[in-house]
């Protein structure tokens, strides 16, 4: 790299020197061509010629001064390049000495490599000897391996026999364990069977006691039902008689009302209005008839509610564990409760506080399609004979 730099610098200096040498001749030739062109184009007077010569001389002097300055600068550059060349030469000498030292080291390393090669040859000879000994050892090892294979075959046979014996022993041990487990399981089953027998005996005794209690309860309920049926028959008979009496009273009231109308008509025709005012009003008789009807209806409702509640209680006692008809039972209980509320409101009359709590409309179903108790009671009060 340094050599290329030096060659480039020397080439540049020689080119500059050659330019400095050639430039005066080129300048003179240019001036000569220019003078010839000027002479050929325009005639010159002696004064103009002298003036042009003076001008040319001045220009030539200026050019000489400029070239002198350029030459001075180029000489300074060449001097600096020479100094740099000297420094580079010193560096090149130093590098050459270093190269010589490196070459000496390379020679030493080659000597060491030759020694290493000799050692390597000796090592290769030793390795060849080791290979021959290894081959002999491998042959001996192969012989020993064949002997080991025979021994291994014998050992495998012995281990197979031992494993078979172990398997037989393990099978007998498992059979013994299975027999122990079976005996323990049979003992556990016997204990559980005894416990189950005792529990079943206790359950049988409890069932017999419950059966006897249920039988006594059934007998009592049958007696009660017979008494209730007899009382219901008596009440129905009494209710029939009362209804007959009410019908007779209604007929009598209708006949009395007809007579009163006739009398009122006769008195009105006769002009006796005061006598008409003293007569009993038809509304009073009708109110009395409605009161009698309401008393009969309340009596019938009370008997009906009493029978239904008794039947429901008997059904609940007989079917305690039957959960399949819970909806029907709830509906029956709700209906009985509504009848009781309506019966209480009817017995208390128009002054009953229950009437102010009940709604005025008909049946209204809620979110679960069920009618609440108040709506049921209102419907029953609106139509007691329903």
Image: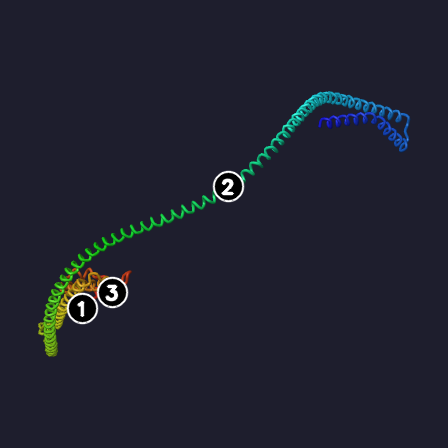
- Residue 271 seen from this side: no
* Residue marked by disc 3: 363
Q: Residue at x 52, y 42 (%)?
A: 146
Quarter residue 226 falls in: bottom left
Residue 248 is marked as none
Quarter residue 350 falls in: bottom left
Task: Give whichever of discs 1 and 2 has the lower sequence position.
Answer: 2
Task: Name the element at disc 2.
Answer: helix
Q: Residue 185, percent across and down?
A: 27, 52
**Colouring style:** rainbow
Q: Residues within 10 Å of mark 3 (few under 14, many from 20)?
A: some
Quick check: marks 3 and 1 in contact, CB under 8 Å?
Answer: no
Q: Residue 112, percent across and down?
A: 65, 25
Find the distance from the CA under tag 3 to the CA under tag 1: 15 Å
Quarter residue 60 falls in: top right
Task: Give whichever of discs 3 and 1 has the lower sequence position.
Answer: 3
* Side (left or right) of 160 relative to 127: left
Q: Nearer the viewer, mark 3 or mark 2?
A: 2
Q: Residue 102, percent across and down?
A: 68, 24
Q: Nearer the viewer, residue 376 or 5?
A: 5
Q: Residue 135, percent across and down?
A: 58, 37
* Residue marked by disc 1: 384
- Residue 366 seen from this side: yes
Residue 147 is marked as 2
Task: Give whichever of discs 3 and 2 has the lower sequence position.
Answer: 2
Q: Residue at x 70, y 21 (%)?
A: 97
Q: Residues within 10 Å of mark 1 (few under 14, many from 20)?
A: some
- For residue 186, above or below residue 76: below
């Amino acid at each position: 790299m340094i050599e290329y730099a030096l060659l480039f610098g020397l080439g540049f200096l020689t080119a500059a020197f050659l330019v400095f040498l050639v430039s005066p001749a080129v300048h003179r030739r240019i001036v000569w061509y220019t003078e010839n062109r000027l002479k050929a184009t325009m005639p010159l007077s002696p004064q103009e010629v002298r003036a042009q010569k003076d001008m040319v001389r001045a220009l030539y002097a200026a050019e000489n001064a400029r070239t002198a300055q350029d030459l001075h600068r180029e000489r300074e550059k060449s001097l600096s390049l020479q100094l740099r060349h000297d420094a580079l030469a010193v560096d090149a000498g130093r590098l050459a000495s270093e190269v010589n030292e490196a070459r000496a080291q390379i020679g030493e390393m080659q000597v060491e490599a030759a020694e290493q090669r000799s050692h390597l040859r000796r090592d290769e000879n030793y390795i060849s000897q080791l290979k021959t000994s290894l081959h002999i050892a491998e042959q001996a090892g192969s012989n020993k391996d064949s002997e080991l294979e025979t021994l291994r075959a014998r050992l495998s046979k012995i281990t197979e026999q031992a494993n078979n014996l172990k398997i037989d022993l393990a099978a007998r041990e498992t059979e013994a364990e299975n027999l122990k487990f079976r005996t323990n399981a049979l003992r556990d089953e016997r204990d559980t069977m005894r416990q189950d027998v005792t529990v079943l005996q206790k359950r049988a005794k409890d069932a017999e006691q419950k059966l006897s209690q249920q039988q006594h309860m059934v007998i009592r309920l049958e007696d009660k039902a017979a008494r209730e049926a007899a009382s219901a028959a008596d009440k129905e008979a009494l209710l029939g008689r009362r209804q007959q009496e009410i019908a007779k009273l209604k007929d009598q009231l209708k006949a009395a009302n007809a007579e009163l109308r006739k009398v009122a008509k006769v008195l009105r025709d006769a002009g006796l209005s005061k006598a008409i005012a003293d007569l009993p009003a038809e509304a009073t008789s009708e109110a009395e008839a409605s009161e009698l009807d309401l008393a009969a209806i309340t009596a019938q409702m009370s008997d009906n509610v009493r029978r239904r509640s008794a039947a429901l209680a008997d059904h609940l006692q007989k079917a305690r564990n039957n959960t399949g008809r819970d909806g029907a039972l709830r509906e029956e209980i709700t209906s009985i409760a509504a009848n009781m509320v309506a019966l209480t409101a009817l017995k208390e009359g128009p002054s009953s506080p229950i009437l102010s709590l009940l709604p005025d409309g008909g049946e209204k179903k809620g979110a679960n399609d069920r009618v609440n108790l108040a709506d049921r009671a209102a419907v029953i009060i609106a139509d007691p004979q329903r």
